Amino acid sequence: ERICYFIRYWIQEFWTMFRLHSSLSDSMEQFQDLIRDQGQERLCPLLQTQWINDRHWSQKPSQKIKANSSKKRKVSLLFDHLEPIELAEHLTYLEFKSFCRISFADYQNYIRSCCMKDNPMMERSITLCNGISQWVQLMVLSRPTAQLRAEVFTKFIHVAQSLHLMHNFNTLMAVVGGLCHSSISRLKETSSHVSHEVTKVLNEMTDLLSSCRNYDNYRQAYSRCAGFKIPILGVHLKDLISVNEAMSDYVEDYKVNVQKLQALYNHINELIQLQQITPQLDANKDLVHLLTLSLDLYYTEDEIYELSYTREPKNNKAPPATPSRPPVVVNWASGVPPKPDPKTISKHVQRMVDSVFKNYDHDENGFISQGDFEKIAASFPFSFCVMDKEKEGLISREEITAYFMRASVICSKLGLALLFTLFPLTQSETHCFHGNMHVKV
């Protein structure tokens, strides 16, 4: 009888597991047959699971935080006009939404498989982390002069400081990882324009996220944080794997190792509980759409290094810095290539275009000015395509949609190597799409 009541508690508290794994319900039916054979049919109602199929999923934590679409709060969609705190808040919004989608079962699957196979929510979180890191590198490298690159670098340092204050350690890892990447650190001319104060802050952030002594600095800072916080997921996943490998599944007499189950549960439950603490953010829906599309773009390491060497060529007198993974990036986040999804890209493009016209089509005639378009396009790392305009000085909704769809498809499927051939990244040619020339890609 005590066992049946214990199982009932398990079913009631973790009913979502029965929705995810139908074999559990089958096992309960078999167990009920065994109970009937023992003459204890009165206990069978305790083990009923049919009600689970009629129960609605409770509100996901990721749905508790909403982007604000009100026109009362206007924000610029231009990267150069955004304050670091605004960028940090919107990156945190995206990060928290992704973090909340990871379920208890996802962590269990990761422990069993030690990989991301068949774990789309966790893979999406990794892709976001990698996307932010690449976006940081590309936004720095997109500027034609060392002074401008240093200004973007400094801006992201201030973004990192805001992320630290918000206790968003996962995005902080991505941003600092991008700034520490050797495609950026090799830019000596750029670094000469970065102030000593900014360099000092970067060193402090790098020390905070260092893997030395099993991320001891990060763990201490993390443990001191109360309330909302987003952990460096990779560090905590490695902890789960360590516990799983260090403790045996069974103890003497083939009894289940309850201590191991409790230890794994405590680690996972801590992460799940963090999903219940929503941040106090005033995210702008239009800016969320713009950032989402920006982070969809994907580049290989070779392509990023090629751009880095284009910006500041190799010094013949000294060997170039050896490409290496940034010192603060956790290994779990590498090697997970994003899977370009045309439907997802199209959805993100449409949302972003809607946001652009809501904010910049002042006459509501279906056009925005060429000047506004150029500023918006500059918020992306690169301008890939030539704009084919019907009206001089005005850009239509269809033209902008086609522009970003073509840029996204090219970037996701053909790669930057082809783009370098079509559009050499020199200062004079960076803005060639603003003219009336037509290039078929």
Image (cartoon, rainbow, N blue to C red):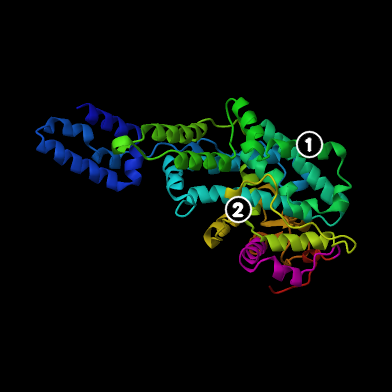
Specify the amino acid type for callout 2: Ser
Q: Which mark is residue 201?
A: 1
Secondary structure under the numbered disc 2 in the rendered image? loop
Q: Position of residue 288 (x, y in %)?
A: 62, 45
Q: Is residue 175 visible?
A: yes
**Residue 426's image quarter?**
bottom right
For the N terminus, the quadrant is top left
Neighbours of disc 2 within 10 Å: few (<14), some (14-19), many (20+): few
Check residue 135 for magenta coloring: no
Q: Position of residue 204 (x, y in %)?
A: 75, 35
Neighbours of disc 1 within 10 Å: few (<14), some (14-19), many (20+): some
For the C terminus, the quadrant is bottom right
Check residue 406 for magenta coloring: yes
* Relative horizontal placement of residue 183, taking residue 245 as reference (left or right): right
Q: Which residue is mark 2?
A: 334
**Residue 97's image quarter?**
top right
The magenta segment is 403-428
Q: Which mark is residue 164?
A: none
- State the residue at coordinates (54%, 60%): 341
* Relative horizontal placement of residue 112, taking residue 426 as reference (left or right): left
Secondary structure under the numbered disc 1 in the rendered image? helix
The answer to whether 211 is drawn above or below residue 166 in the figure is below
